[in-house]
């Protein structure tokens, strides 16, 4: 109330309407405006001024605003495109790496298959060597029954590895890396298994070669102690010259060593089979040794050219080695006698037989029955007179029999 009174005191109070007079020459026009009309006109004028200012500002700054908005959208689009390009490059790199990993895996599979085929080929080559070495009863080298490709397919299948499919999403790519590592572990295990088999094959062959060499040396030593030298001449060989390329393979070298050892052992075994080392009257005791003795009939000193085996009449007499019957019949003081011709100028005589079971010219094997113990000829009782001769020179049969016992345990 005080404010209103103060305003009236300063400006006064006007309640009359406003009159506007317009003069144009002699013409006068006047308008009377009420206070409310003035307020409306003032409001309209203010609104018009504001609209004019806004419109003017828009027209002035429109290009700048549109340009800023376009630039902002362009920056966002470029950033989005750059992000997409980076992700695409990353995906391409990962897919390329996975394709390379798959190629490497395929190469590993092919390599393992080649090694497996080599093992199978080696096994086929080792089979006759194992048979020659007498190692058929559980001593043959171990050969895998499954191929590495099948093992790896099963392993990769159980792991769910599909490298091409894993390139579709980043999550699958990460899974692909883990599975690729798992596949590498599987390849490593298979490779170690194949290496172990190869090592077992080579070790087994080396052991067989060493055993064959030791056996051969032991047989040769036993024969040497008996004064027997085998003819193992292997110079009658030949063939075209083919130079070896590079360093020899360990497996091939071991195979050659084993083959050479077994060949030498076969030659020794074949040579031993033709040497009279067997006992012609196994289980019978020796009643008279080789050398000088008192003659059982005359009582004077005489030379005994063989060994006497005491035994019952009719006891089997066996050939001490393979050979050809050179004589079968009665021969003076020998009585019924069989003489067999062996290799290297050796021959054996079996005298005082009660029966003969072979004929002249017949080939007999070592251990084959050729007659029966008897007491024919110059004899005091049933026994076998056994002689070993080299080019008709009598040799003591005892070293032959001793060597035969040693070699029998070796061969």
Image: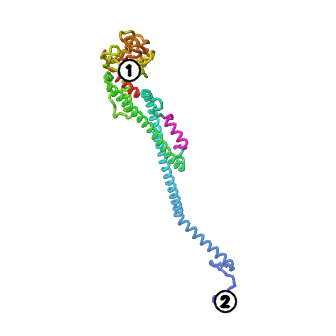
Dominant secondary structure of the residues highlighted in magenta in the image: helix
Is 62 on the left-hand or right-hand side of 32? left
As drawn, the label of residue 287 is 1
- Dividing the picture into quarters, in which one does residue 269 lie? top left
Check the picture and name the quadrant holding the C terminus.
Answer: top left
Judge the density around disc 1: few (<14), some (14-19), many (≥20) Cα neighbours within 10 Å.
Answer: few
Residue at the extreme front of the image, as rendered: 299
Q: Position of residue 196 (x, y in %)?
A: 44, 39
> For mark 2, does the 10 Å Cα neighbourhood hold few (<14), some (14 to 19), or many (20 or more) residues?
few
Element marked by disc 1: strand
- Which badge, 1 or 2, comes first in the chain's sequence? 2
Disc 2 secondary structure class? helix
| Quadrant in the picture for residue 313 | top left
Distance from label 1 to label 2 (Cα)? 172 Å
Q: Is residue 41 above or below residue 255?
A: below
x, y percentage for residue 410?
A: 40, 28
Span shown in magenta = 144-163
């Amino acid at each position: 109330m005080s404010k209103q009174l103060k305003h009236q005191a300063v400006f006064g109070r006007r309640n009359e309407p406003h009159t506007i007079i317009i003069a144009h020459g002699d013409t006068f026009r006047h308008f009377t405006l009420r206070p409310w009309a003035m307020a409306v006109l003032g409001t309209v004028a203010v609104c018009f001024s504001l609209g004019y200012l806004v419109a003017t500002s828009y027209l002035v700054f429109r290009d700048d605003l549109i340009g800023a908005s376009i630039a902002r959208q362009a920056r966002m689009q470029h950033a989005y495109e750059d992000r997409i390009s980076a992700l695409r490059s990353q995906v391409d790199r990962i897919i390329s790496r996975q394709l390379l990993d798959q190629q490497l895996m395929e190469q590993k599979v092919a390599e393992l298959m080649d090694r497996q085929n080599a093992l199978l080929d080696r096994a086929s080559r080792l089979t006759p060597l194992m048979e020659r070495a007498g190692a058929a009863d559980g001593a043959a080298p171990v050969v895998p029954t499954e191929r590495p490709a099948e093992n790896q397919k099963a392993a990769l299948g159980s792991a769910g590895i599909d490298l091409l499919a894993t390139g579709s999403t980043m999550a699958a790519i990460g899974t692909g890396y883990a599975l690729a590592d798992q596949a590498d572990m599987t390849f490593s295990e298979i490779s170690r298994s194949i290496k172990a088999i190869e090592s077992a094959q080579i070790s087994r062959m080396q052991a067989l070669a060493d055993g064959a060499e030791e056996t051969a040396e032991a047989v040769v030593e036993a024969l040497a102690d008996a004064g027997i030298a085998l003819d193992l001449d292997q110079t009658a060989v030949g063939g075209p010259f083919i130079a070896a390329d590079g360093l020899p393979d360990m497996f091939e070298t071991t195979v050659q060593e084993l083959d050479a050892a077994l060949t030498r052992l076969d030659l020794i075994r074949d040579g031993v089979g033709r040497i009279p080392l067997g006992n012609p009257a196994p289980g019978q005791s020796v009643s008279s040794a080789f050398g000088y003795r008192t003659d059982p009939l005359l009582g004077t000193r005489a030379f005994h050219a063989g060994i006497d085996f005491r035994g019952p009449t009719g006891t089997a007499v066996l050939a001490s080695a393979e050979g050809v019957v050179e004589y079968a019949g009665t021969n003076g003081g020998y009585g019924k006698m069989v003489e067999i011709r062996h290799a290297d100028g050796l021959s054996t005589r079996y005298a005082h037989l009660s029966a003969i079971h072979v004929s002249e010219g017949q080939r007999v094997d070592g251990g084959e029955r050729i007659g029966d113990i008897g007491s024919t000829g110059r004899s005091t009782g049933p026994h076998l007179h056994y002689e070993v001769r080299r080019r008709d020179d009598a040799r003591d049969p005892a070293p032959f029999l001793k060597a035969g016992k040693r070699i029998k345990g070796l061969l």
